[in-house]
Image (tube, coloured by chain):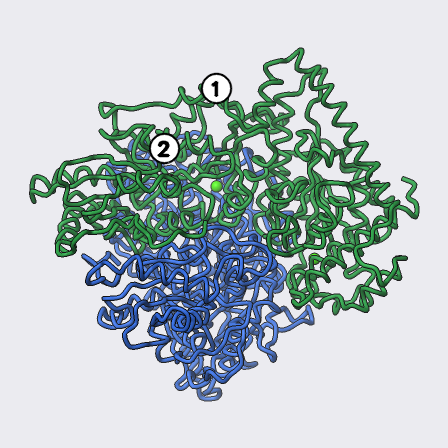
Chain colours: A green, B blue
């Protein structure tokens, strides 16, 4: 306690800096509502941010990767100038020039915070509801890591996760899902602060958001606290944060009542919102806060001094922690080395020898079952693996037999050291929580649902890709092959959707070796998430498959001299193509080669020479996949797929995904291309795409 | 009140029928967890369904389209055998043969209920959380239609919407969003019954779902009621439903405590769940319920009699309503005729004359602004239009100036007759609610958000398409052209995603006439939803565009004799291509024609002859669109796009989407294809896709 004028000077510096940067970014561009909303948020939350960062948070700006730092998540990411200002003032590698470059191309101060661009930003936010759900993931990761690494005499991991969020985040379903789970999991290490400014972009929250938020969070099992004067009452904020820390078995939501547009000429009125802060308003705001109205981007030295002092304390805390950890290492060498390895996102040497290998003599097995075998074989050597399912464990086969559930001990259902998370029917939260778990740095999350319902989590999946988090979706029941559950559960567009999303691998393995390959690449790709699409139905072990071939993303599964056509396929259709090749030989005297492309994105990274060896010039090609043909034109001349919804029931005959059906279309393809001289493989392109 | 043995016979008939149909569908196929979960649900909810359908619901099985019928939504759609059994027993066009065909190809009794397949099914459910959110839409539609059509002396519209839901639905974020809004909107006409059986697919709800649901719904502003014995207490159920009806300004959630696996050998134990009901268990269940254990699909005549009696009452009620409505028509002819027209989903004659038309002399305008003009011009002639935005009204420009908000009168912010819905930051609920509004039959919903956040609603969008509902997404800020908000807000994969989804139109108009065309086709397509992708930035009115051309989905925007290349584009890139054509002529002496394809799906329905006239043989083509190139290979030889995330800031120069950048790639395309004789347009295909 005991706040001085310097504290207020610092708070007002943040406010003025945010206004200057926004006005600067705005020059020549009228203020978009989101941007202005963000500016108001930045100003409104500055007092709380000051208290939190200076009195509570433990971090070292010189090493933003220190594992036991406190995490801060700005879920209302449009207020990112608040965060950029804090990072700058504390001495992170965010310069004043970076602040001036706010919202300009190739700056590290993007319009919303991006974790892979900006040191000190833990997760990428902006799309509402994601940040608070990421925060739940960060808190889960802390609890699990602490439970596994702490010893009676060594509290190696004990950080908190703090999160600021606005009304928009509270309205989004993903935050409801994540908050319900956080309450169930009794995450006492999670403290969220709600900027209750009674304003959304459309106007007063009375328009659409009149629920009793505090009661709802109590219903979830959270502690709820209120700070009535979020504009001035620094002591009250500190008290609330202490109270939040003191309750160990519940997450806390602090309702911070703030005045919209604080400091502006129109503060507290509705009109402040959405409109840009005008030049004269910025000037009076600076005057009001004791700044020179003619100066921009000014930071008083005593503010730097105050903040750098706390940063130095953080550096000292890390130094002390380093000693503690070294000492820990002398007693618990295995754990010590394991933690260091995990933070580097390295895998233990030789882990890949545990991946199962198959021969054609092995039985036909559903690829979801093959995935279960992979997980069961590798979980022992990869203790960072932490799995779960959105209430489809028995269908997704995501839980190895000996797994313990991650649960609060009081439930009697597991412990915090457990490695299996019962996400409930909450796909979107599962995606966002996995992003948070991955961002924490010590764990490697995977989560199961039906492929069709990965779409429920599209918002989170997109951010996995953008923020380059390593995690795995175990997406079973991957096609109309699931049968009787019908078109509501049968993906048609899903692979096209995620194949079109940059920096995510979509795998659809055809057999056991390809499933092992999918996991191999997914686990060793430190900056790319993966979706592994897996069948409900049994698939034979193929003659031509090996892990080595499949990790190239595409390869020749069945070669034949003098082939007249290439059949190209994925997953459960590869074996149909191989049968079709036999059928073509027997019934039509046609020679067909078969190619499997379990992962477009990985295949695309191979040399052109290799890709042309798989999809050669000179003969036509036909793709076969039981869903939308969209995207297959990039690899093949003709496409056999399903550009309509499926049906409830057994599918093969209805849609002709049989050796006969494929052969019919292969013959049509050969006929259609027979008069074209020097058929060019689609691998050949006039120019390179921007990637 | 006063339930007899016949009531219990009927209830047990439903239970036995559900078990028989599930066992029948199962033969040869091991029971999937979802299916078994559904069977248990069917059995558990049979008593409540019996009370609700017989004592409360008003419907006529001979006319499932009667506008004032009560609506029933099975949000836990995996329990659909309950619904199929009810439909059959009441005499809907669902025969015993249909029941026996449960979950088989081309049956009307799919694995989850599909509204376009099965008479009496109001909305398509199965994907969890959707049904209850659709129910909110149905209730909104009822309230709005009643407010606009009822007169003091004529209560034409006064139906209720009932919804059954399970734990899974309650865990999904979309239901949280919709339920919060329903509470805000004080929808007293909405009554939901929660099957509180304490079981999810993963096991006991204690695993992941320990929140206080009733408290949460109270926080949303719902009335909450409890029935302690959902297995036996028919009177209690009736009492709760009456109490629900009596509260007019709140939706009601009834918690119905049921026993999992009721009637089974293992009832009430966890083991009943997930495993199929064995043959001997079905037999003992039949014996226990007084049925012949050796007989299957048996319905006692007195059960048919009882249910048909209620159906006859429903038919009589409709008859009476028809008289009332005819009488109403004599006093309020305009309203009468308007309602009849709306129910047929016809638009008023000549409405399309209100669509704005532009010439190249008109100013450059952002297409989101052009969309606002369309809405403003047509709202007067299309009173069924009911719009909204997920808290981005000022950015989406979805609200015409004179619009009134749809709000409970007590808020002072609008009335139930209003036509603008403040959805809050709830994209997924908006999508699901629009599905419900459209399904009601009297309204035509549209909703705005950024294109990037339509992805949050992917689960609902997919069901719009599958269930063939007419509705419109006004999806603004449609590309990296939005600039400073950065990659978290810039769609890359979104168009590919929804283009790959069957039965939905994705429009990306290039100017005013194309925007009018997009609305024209969207509004006149009775069974297809639309997404209209609109720019933030200004776009010029193009020389070659007319509504007539654009409604074909693709057309020649700029023709030139002896063209050496076709530039193919959409939206904000069409004008860049037109400038590129000029640039190519001036700097490279190259003749380029330009094609605009604002909607793939509509273009695909044109004759091959027409499509070949737009994308002819003989010259190469290059597509230009500032997002994923996926799917463009279907129309063009080469593609210029963005297969990576965007950047925060002005984009054009960075990614070369300029006349120069396009020209560079056009030259490369021409060079690459110059040695290929008889270049074949990609419109030519070896065989037709299954559509
Ligand atoms: Ca707010
Ligand atoms: Ca349940």
Mark 1, Cα crowd under 10 Å, few <14 / some 14-19 / many 20+, is: few
Find residue B631 and report its horizontal and vertical position in percent: 35, 56
- Ranked by sequence position, the earlier of labels 1 and 2 is 1
Determine whether label 1 and label 2 are within 8 Å by CB.
Answer: no
Chain containing the residue with disc 2: A
Question: Is residue A184 left or right of A323 when viewed as pictured?
Answer: left
Ligand 1 visible in quadrant: bottom right
Q: Which dot marks residue B673?
A: none
Find residue A528 and report its horizontal and vertical position in percent: 49, 39
Q: Which dot marks residue A349?
A: 1
Chain containing the residue with disc 1: A
Find residue B561 and report its horizontal and vertical position in percent: 29, 77
Find residue A485 and report its horizontal and vertical position in percent: 34, 45
Tag 2 residue = A551
Give residue B180's quadrant in the image.
bottom right
Q: CA distance from mark 1 to mark 2?
A: 18 Å
Q: For the C terminus of chain B, give its image quadrant.
A: bottom left
Front one among B256 and A633: A633
**Tag 2 secondary structure:** loop
Front one among A603 and A647: A603
């Amino acid at each position: 306690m005991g706040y001085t004028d310097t504290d207020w000077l610092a708070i007002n510096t943040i406010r003025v800096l945010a206004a200057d940067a926004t006005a600067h970014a705005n020059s020549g561009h009228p203020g978009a509502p989101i941007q202005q909303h963000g500016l108001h948020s930045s100003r409104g939350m500055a007092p709380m941010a000051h208290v939190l960062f200076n009195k509570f948070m433990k971090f070292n700006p010189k090493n933003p990767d220190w594992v036991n730092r406190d995490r801060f998540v700005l879920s209302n990411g449009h207020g990112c100038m608040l965060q950029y200002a804090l990072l700058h003032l504390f001495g992170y590698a965010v310069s004043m020039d970076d602040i001036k470059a706010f919202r300009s191309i190739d700056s590290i101060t993007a319009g919303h915070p991006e974790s892979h661009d900006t040191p000190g930003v833990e997760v990428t936010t902006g799309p509402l509801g994601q940040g608070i759900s990421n925060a739940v993931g960060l808190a889960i990761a802390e609890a699990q890591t602490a439970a596994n690494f702490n010893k009676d005499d060594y509290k190696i991991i004990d950080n908190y996760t703090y999160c600021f969020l606005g009304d928009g985040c509270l309205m989004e379903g993903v935050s409801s899902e994540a908050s319900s789970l956080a309450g169930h999991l009794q995450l006492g290490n999670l403290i969220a602060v709600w900027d209750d400014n009674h304003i959304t972009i459309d106007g007063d929250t009375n328009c659409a958001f009149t629920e009793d938020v505090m009661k709802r969070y109590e219903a979830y099992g959270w502690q709820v606290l209120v700070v009535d004067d979020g504009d001035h009452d620094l002591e009250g904020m500190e008290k609330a944060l202490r109270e939040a820390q003191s309750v160990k078995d519940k997450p806390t939501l602090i309702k911070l009542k703030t005045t919209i547009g604080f400091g502006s000429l129109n503060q507290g009125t509705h009109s402040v919102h959405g409109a840009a802060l005008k030049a004269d308003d910025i000037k009076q705001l600076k005057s009001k806060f004791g700044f020179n109205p003619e100066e921009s981007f000014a930071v008083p030295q005593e503010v730097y001094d105050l903040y750098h002092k706390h940063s130095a304390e953080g550096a000292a805390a890390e130094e002390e922690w380093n000693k503690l950890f070294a000492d820990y290492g002398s007693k618990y060498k295995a754990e010590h080395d394991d933690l260091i390895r995990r933070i580097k996102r390295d895998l233990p040497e030789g882990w890949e020898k545990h991946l199962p290998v198959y021969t054609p003599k092995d039985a036909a097995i559903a690829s979801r079952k093959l995935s279960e075998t992979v997980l069961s074989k590798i979980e022992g050597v990869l203790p960072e693996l932490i799995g779960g399912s959105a209430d489809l464990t028995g269908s997704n086969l995501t839980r190895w037999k000996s797994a313990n559930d991650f649960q609060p001990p009081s439930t009697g259902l597991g412990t915090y050291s457990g490695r299996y998370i019962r996400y409930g029917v909450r796909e979107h939260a599962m995606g966002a929580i996995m992003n948070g778990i991955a961002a924490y740095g010590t764990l490697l999350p995977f989560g199961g649902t039906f492929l069709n319902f990965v779409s429920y989590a599209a918002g989170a999946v997109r951010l996995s890709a953008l923020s380059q988090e390593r995690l795995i979706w175990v997406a079973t029941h991957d096609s109309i092959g699931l049968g009787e559950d019908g078109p509501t559960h049968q993906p048609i567009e899903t692979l096209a959707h995620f194949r079109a999303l940059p920096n995510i691998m979509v795998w659809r393995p055809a057999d056991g070796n390809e499933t092992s390959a999918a996991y191999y690449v997914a686990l060793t790709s430190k900056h790319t998430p993966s979706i592994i699409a897996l069948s409900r139905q049994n698939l034979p072990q193929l003659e031509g498959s090996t892990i080595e071939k499949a990790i190239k993303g595409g390869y020749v599964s069945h070669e034949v001299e003098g082939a007249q056509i290439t059949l190209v396929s994925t997953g459960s259709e590869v074996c149909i193509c191989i049968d079709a090749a036999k059928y073509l030989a027997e019934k039509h005297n046609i020679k067909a080669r078969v190619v499997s492309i379990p992962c477009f994105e990985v295949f695309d990274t191979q040399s052109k020479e290799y890709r042309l060896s798989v999809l050669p010039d000179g003969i036509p090609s036909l793709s076969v996949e039981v869903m939308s043909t969209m995207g297959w034109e990039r690899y093949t001349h003709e496409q056999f797929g399903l550009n309509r919804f499926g049906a409830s029931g057994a599918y093969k005959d209805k849609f002709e995904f049989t050796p006969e059906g494929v052969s019919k279309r292969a013959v049509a393809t050969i006929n259609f291309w027979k008069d074209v001289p020097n058929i060019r493989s689609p691998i050949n392109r006039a120019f390179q795409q921007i990637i």
